[in-house]
Amino acid sequence: MLRRRITIVALVCLVLSALLILLHLPIGTNSRVMAQGLGRDASQPDATAHQVFLPAVEKSTVALPSFLTEYPVSASPLHVAVESPGHIWFTLPDQNQIGRLVVTSPTQYQVSTYAVPTVNSEPYDLEYAAGIVWFTERMGNKIGRLVPATGTIDEFTIPTANSQPTGIVAVAGSPTQVWFTERSGNALGKLVVNSVADYTFTEYALPGSYLNAQPEDLYIVTTDIIWFTAPGVSRFARFRPSLWPSSSAFDFVFAGSGSLPWAIKVDSGGYPWLTDRTGNRIGMFFPQTISDMRWYPLPNASSDPFGLAIAQGFVWFTERGGNRIGRIDPSSHTLRELNLPSGSVPEGLAADTDGCIWIAERGRNQIASWCSPYFLSVYLPLIQRGQ
């Protein structure tokens, strides 16, 4: 009798699992990591990361549809920035616009767009700070400032022509400091703004030994500690403006042969995290022990990790090629992934103070929100035939 009851319960669990699959619920994976080290390469002129590769153990998880909500926008969003929960800004490079999404409920929302004055400027990345939206104009070679209260956009032309500004971080204050990377200019830039008529640019050229570094993203810890990625030379680096123009102002870290460090963020402990697009992994720079670098390889090949955010004690990232979003728990060294609807091509992402993750789905012209509890675990029964 007991064996019959167990068999009935097992069959019910299987039926429920099959129903979940038929509903096309996204499936995630959970990966636990262990460390294996490589030695320091003294042949490199800069600091070379001690690389730690972390194999995975998987467990099935399911994300409920109610955890992920999509909001259609007018074109293909690239990067996103959070003003407050439910108030999201994003760039629309192909339409030469900045967009704003205001969500009051899953079924009630409003999308507004603001045309950038310079034609074909391709707004790239953006930052919301103290009531102002700052953004880079990659092809327009400008830094833009949008005042939401009036819809006014002011533009500031970068001194180096065709510098292709990409990443941007704004430090609000009097004056406001806006830091940015110059992909083609091979430099970091700083714009100090007192007013539309009173502003100054300072450009910090990368060392000559790192020509064509193509700096992409940056993160400000303090105004004298700035981390940035240099995918053109497979490195990321720390910049100390107070040491400029000495060559010691830059400390480069080698991320591995053929690597493409892209997005970078720094956690509350001061440790930089980055996405490596060609290496198909997420990395943490941990220079306090024999392990300088802790790598989290992604379970699926060619996932192309792109955007990055740190919030709620987790590291979040998009998989542009894998059509997924991932989450790493640094405390347990676990990695989970969420499958997105087909053709999403997720790129930029950002987190709000409520713990929701906002994602630019460039392939589907959508902004998606992914909110707590994020995953629902489903445990399949183990059925054994009685002897």
Image (spheres, grey):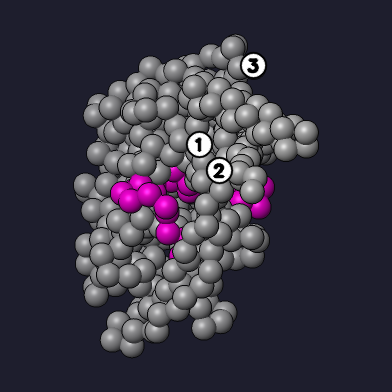
Q: Can you tell which of label 2 and label 3 is closer to the viewer?
A: 2
Magenta-drawn stretch contains 154: no
Q: Secondary structure at mark 3?
A: strand
The rendered magenta stretch, by its main secondary structure, is classed as strand
The residue labelled by disc 1 is 27
Q: Is residue 152 above or below residue 167?
A: above
Residue at image location 39% in from the left, 73% down from the top:
253
Residue 105 got which mark? 3
Q: What residue sits right under mark 2 in the picture? A: 60
Kindly give the residue lying farthest to the right in the view shown: 2
**Extreme top residue here?**
108
* Cβ atoms at labels 2 and 1 below 8 Å apart: yes
State if disc 3 and disc 1 touch (CB < 8 Å). no
Q: Is residue 196 left or right of residue 105?
A: left
Name the amino acid, label 1: Ile
Q: Earlier in the sequence, mark 2 or mark 1?
A: 1
Q: Is residue 315 magenta?
A: yes
Residues drawn in magenta: 295-318
Identify the secondary structure beneath mark 2. strand
Looking at marks 1 and 3 on the same chain, the residue that comes earlier in the sequence is marked by 1
The x and y percentages for residue 319 are 40, 44
- Observer-nearest of 89 and 178: 89
Asked which quadrant contains residue 72, the reply is top left
Question: Which residue is more in the foreground, 377 or 142?
Answer: 377
Task: Give the answer, above or below, for where 60 lies relative to 341.
Answer: below
